[in-house]
Amino acid sequence: DVKVTQSSRYLVKRTGEKVFLECVQDMDHENMFWYRQDPGLGLRLIYFSYDVKMKEKGDIPEGYSVSREKKERFSLILESASTNQTSMYLCASSPWTSGAARGNEQYFGPGTRLTVT
Amino acid sequence: DAKTTQPPSMDCAEGRAANLPCNHSTISGNEYVYWYRQIHSQGPQYIIHGLKNNETNEMASLIITEDRKSSTLILPHATLRDTAVYYCIVRVAGYNAGNMLTFGGGTRLMVKP
């Protein structure tokens, strides 16, 4: 089974702190994603990566950065946490496929509920 | 992506089959139907996908009508652990690392003892 793990289930940080959220997957997937999920807004894509050291902005990248130094690990960084970044953060991975449906099979981690005070 | 319509909630007795419908009348020929679920306080979980043939895996079966305008996810023997919000998504296949999964309202399935 695919396993996606995230470094923390719950995190409380202060405004202005730099926050690191780590995600590791064990299925050798090429694609990795960071989403945030908020009530009434569904899932929103922050950043994604389709290869080591490659990254692309999603819909809401402002205030975030990412790092992918190894294939299995994708980190989300909040440069200076703000209260509007209080949210559930979800990491996902999927296999690289060309012209096939499996690229939409995304496997999610358990999520990190971040509270910024 | 084609729009999907699902009932907001459903109940099912434990041990019985849960049949979750989804309408996607504007689906195009190269779009697949995907199902995910999200158990409370957990990340979404991929269940199954299909194009036009019925599909079955260890979790569920997916029945797609011949005109592909609707589908039904079947959990053959629902358990209390299947209580979750179920999302039906229609997406084009193919490589696209920017495949943002957009979840609509979904169906909140409550499995009762």
Image (cartoon, grey):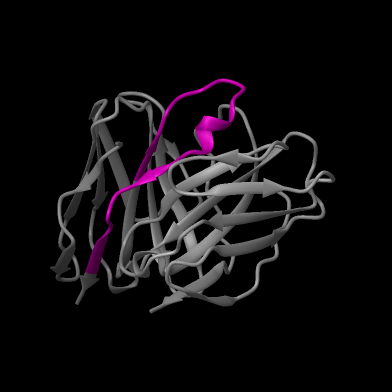
Q: Quadrant of the C terminus of chain A?
A: bottom left
- In the depicted structure, whether residue A48 falls above or below residue B41: above
Image position of B23 (left or right of B108): right
Residue at the far top in the pictured view: A98
Looking at the image, which is closer to me, A86 or A10? A10
The residue under the point 61% across, 63% down is B20
Q: Is residue A39 left or right of residue A108?
A: right
Where residue B68 sits: x, y (%)? 79, 46
Residue B58 drawn at (x, y percent): 43, 42
Along the viewing direction, whichever of B47 and A102 lies nearer the viewer: B47
For the residue pair B78 and B62, the one nearer the viewer reads as B78
Q: Where does the magenta region start and end?
A: A92-114
- Which quarter of the figure has residue A90? bottom left
Q: Is residue B10 above or below residue A4?
A: below
Quadrant housing the N terminus of chain A = top left
- Rendered location of residue B30, percent (x, y): 74, 34
Residue A56 on the magenta span: no
Looking at the image, which residue is at 38% across and 59% down? A36
- Tell me which residue sits at (57%, 66%) in the image: B106
Outermost residue toward the front?
B15
